Amino acid sequence: MVKLAELQKFLVDKAIIFPTAEMYGSFAGFFDYGPLGVEIKRAVKQEWWNRFVSRREVVGMDGCIITHPKVWEASGHIQAFQDPLVECKKCKMRFRADQLVETKLKMNVEGLVLKDLGRIMREHDIDCQKCGGELIDPRYFNLMFSTEVGAVQGNTAYLRPETAQVMFVDFPRIFKSSRGKLPFGIAQIGRSFRNEISPRNFVFRGREFEQMEIEYFFNKNSKPTETLPKMEVTVWTRSAQEKKEPHKKTKISELLKLTSEWHVYWIAHSMKFLVDLGLRLENLRLRQHTKDELSHYAKDTWDIDYNYPFGWKEMVGISNRADFDLKQHSKFSGNDLSVLDGDERVYPFVMEPSFGVDRLVMALLIDAWHRDDERQTLKLNPKIAPVQVAVFPLVNKESMPEKSMEVFNQLSNEFRAFYDDKGSIGRRYRRQDSIGTPFCITIDGQTLEDDTITLRHRDSMNQERVKIGKLSQKLSESF
Ligand code: GAP
């Protein structure tokens, strides 16, 4: 199992992902992506967009980060988007009360009211983790970042804590101007902000992060017509959690006995996307939310958990938001957001697959990172490798650099290509293995005679000779 501290060191050393403003001692919960990291992240987002937006009845949008304050009143975030906070009376350090109890007592306190959380903490003498000082009773802390808009003081607005709400408030305009027919989805990729009390586990719980979300609007009496992908998956149902039973393997179609057809449809397609992207099925689990932990807007929620080095944790949340949001915005704005579905006027129900980009990139890196005495390899799916093909002249003479440049220029039109002429060929291969480059091409003496190159495969380390004219087609077959 990968150790988080070791992976983190690797990612920081290679400037793939690292804490922001390191020279000022960093800034908890905020991370930057360097040249390789940004390519991986961009490729992951592109794959998601290609899968869910470009080829379906789903359209994209790009909404504002600072959103009208009324949006968050209507959505319930001002009242309910909060975590229980405790503060040390001595050193003033702040902690999330539920996380303290869960870590110390290994008990699930999801959904407990403040009074009960406080009682448990007192009964078990839970003190400050930093200095051992006494903690004040838990109180709620709203996670939204606020700011002031314009020159007038008191004009408070919020940085969005989810991309979702912008899609609800823009629904009428986009629906009318696009398909105008249910089912219909709006998708968005963008930054969200949460003033997490205890950011932790590297980018897993950040204060600024990216989400890829779809709001999928449908008539609650309709059903998907597409057949489900066939998969066997690990599932932890609500009832198994309540009975303290372990998760178990089941066919994805079995979920139809537990939740609605549209929900299973989005769960199955989200799982399939993750596996196609390169995640190992055995590291994925579906977990249904217990009644106590359901968000205020959700009728039912299923998380796709990933088996991170610090345990099974949510990577994707798939919620049935019913007609909660459209009705709330109708009420608060005075605009009726119901639509015609044939002859029937309805408030569409909404299914929401919500992917955290940073949690997904982290999981992909964990699954891909392999080390042995010989080498360190990032076995990323070629589609998301930051460099897809590296081109080397065997030596820096005899026209090999010129020929290599020619091949590099040709390939860089189609692939993320990299040119390297420094160090021994073995070292160049190792460098590319460690950053996940699936293919390396070496131009040698024979190239100058017969126009063939050596193509070296990252995972098998096999080498083969390929005609330069056939290279592009050969590589494309692997993507
Ligand atoms: N619109 C629904 C929503 O935002 P959520 O479960 O709060 O639901 C969805 O968040 C996804 O966003 C999570 O599954 C996770 O991947 C990501 N996410 C949430 N909070 C995060 C944080 N503090 N840092 C990184 N990713 C986060």
Image: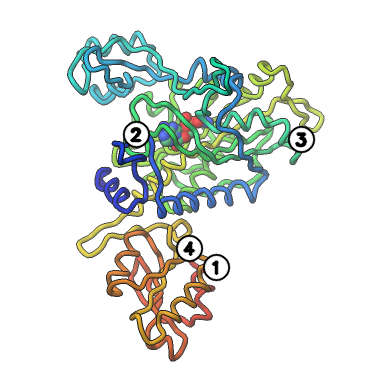
Residue 472's spot in the image, x, y percent?
52, 73
Could you give the CA–CA distance between mark 2 and mark 3, rounded to whole angstroms?
43 Å
Q: Earlier in the sequence, mark 2 or mark 1?
A: 2
How packed mark 4 is, by other alpha carbons closer than 10 Å (few <14, some 14-19, many 20 or more), is some
Could you give the CA–CA distance between mark 3 and mark 4, rounded to whole angstroms?
39 Å
Q: Amino acid at mark 1?
A: Asn
Q: Amino acid at mark 4?
A: Arg
Residue 470's spot in the image, x, y percent?
52, 79
Mark in the foreground, 2 or 4 = 2
List the residue tagged with mark 3: 176
The residue sitting at the bottom extreme is: 449
Could you give the CA–CA distance between mark 4 and mark 1, rounded to whole angstroms?
8 Å
- Residue 416 numbered mark, or none: 4
List the residue tagged with mark 2: 27
List the residue tagged with mark 1: 413
Q: Earlier in the sequence, mark 3 or mark 1?
A: 3
Q: Is residue 255 visible?
A: yes
Residue 378 left/right relative to 473 = left
Q: Earlier in the sequence, mark 2 or mark 4?
A: 2
- Residue 94 numbered mark, or none: none
